[in-house]
Image (cartoon, grey):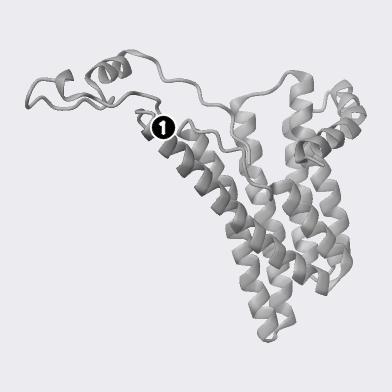
């Protein structure tokens, strides 16, 4: 089943709850902040050895994470700041949970505990860089909606690990490490391919502008910041384009 299909089905299951929250006047930001609080609680629970309870709390936190965007669209409160805030808090959420799990592995002691704590750091780094690669690419005007292991998959795998016990949690962390970094490499390869295609088409990567010809400027003339003489003139007179809201 295509990823987009099951995501759409999950959204449809949450529609009644979204409609109820809209009627009650709950704001998307309130839902986002509730999710943040729950992720911190889950991280503390995981760090103190209550992995099963952490998994249960993380399920509710994941629902909040799925609700806020839908609620924003339902109530007409979609904004660039809201998208920015949501993406930023998503990173804090993941940091809280993985730091809690790392703390638990350190408390267990021994070489295996130390190794797993380092694996948690690698999982957190992979998670953050997975999101950064997309945000940076889209900031350059390049589409980067690729990669099969994004935040929803990371959350589901982490929840299963917390609920099923120490061995499952160990496996879950390594799965997050492996596939997060695979997704990072997927996105790097995707962006490289897009840039090479633009270069072969004669454009300037990330701008779509044509390269400057030698005849476009007088000998010894300095090249303007906009790339071509015409492009520099246009850049000095045109307002900056609004960026598309970024998500992970």
Q: Is residue 228 left or right of residue 80?
A: left
| Quarter of the figure that contains the N terminus | top right
Apparent side of residue 55 relative to residue 65 in the rendered image (left or right): right
Whether residue 47 is visible: no
Q: Is residue 128 left or right of residue 51?
A: left
Query: Going by the picture, which residue comes out furthest to the bottom?
Result: 110
Label 1 neighbour load within 10 Å: few <14, some 14-19, many 20+: some
Left or right of residue 190: residue 236: left
The outermost residue toward the top is 237
The residue shown at (31%, 13%) is 237
Q: Is residue 152 above or below residue 108?
A: above
Q: Quadrant of the C terminus?
A: top right
> For the residue labelled by badge 1, is the local secondary structure a helix, a strand or a loop?
helix
Q: How many marks?
A: 1
Q: Which image quarter: residue 227?
A: top left
Q: Which residue is mark 1?
A: 198
Farthest residue in the front direction?
Answer: 200
Image spot of residue 152 (x, y percent): 75, 47
Q: Position of residue 232 (x, y in %)?
A: 26, 20
Residue pictured at 25% horizontal, 27% vertical: 225
Instruction: Please state which of residues 91 and 2 is positioned toward the viewer in this rendering.
Output: 2
96 vs 222: above or below: below
Question: Can you give x and y, in whole percent of width and height, for residue 120 in the image?
Answer: 65, 66
Q: Residue at x 61, y 38 (%)?
A: 145
Q: Nearer the viewer, residue 53 or 197?
A: 197
Residue 204 or 154: which is nearer the viewer?
A: 204
Up the image or down, 167 lies above or below 145; here it is below
The answer to whether residue 72 of the structure is visible from this angle is yes
Residue 112: % across, % down = 69, 82
């Amino acid at each position: 089943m295509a990823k987009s299909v099951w995501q759409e089905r999950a959204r449809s299951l949450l529609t009644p709850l979204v409609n109820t929250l809209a009627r009650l006047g709950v704001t998307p930001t309130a839902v986002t902040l509730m999710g943040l609080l729950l992720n911190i609680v889950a991280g503390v629970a995981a760090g103190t050895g209550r992995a099963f309870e952490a998994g249960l709390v993380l399920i509710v936190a994941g629902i909040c994470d799925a609700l806020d965007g839908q609620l924003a669209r339902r109530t007409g409160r979609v904004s660039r700041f809201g998208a920015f805030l949501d993406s930023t808090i998503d990173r804090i959420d993941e940091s809280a949970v993985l730091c809690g799990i790392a703390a638990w592995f350190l408390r267990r002691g021994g070489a295996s505990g130390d190794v797993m704590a380092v694996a948690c750091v690698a999982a957190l780094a992979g998670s953050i860089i997975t999101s950064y690669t997309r945000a940076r690419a889209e900031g350059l005007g390049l589409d980067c909606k690729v990669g099969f292991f994004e935040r929803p998959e990371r959350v589901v795998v982490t929840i299963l690990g917390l609920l099923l016990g120490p061995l499952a949690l160990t496996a879950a962390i390594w799965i997050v490490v492996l596939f997060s970094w695979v997704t990072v490499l997927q996105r790097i390869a995707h962006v490289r391919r897009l840039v090479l295609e633009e270069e072969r088409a004669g454009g300037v990567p990330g701008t779509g502008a044509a390269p400057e010809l030698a005849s476009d400027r007088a000998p010894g003339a300095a090249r303007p910041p906009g790339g071509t003489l015409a492009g520099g003139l246009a850049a000095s007179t045109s307002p900056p384009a609004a960026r598309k809201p970024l998500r992970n």
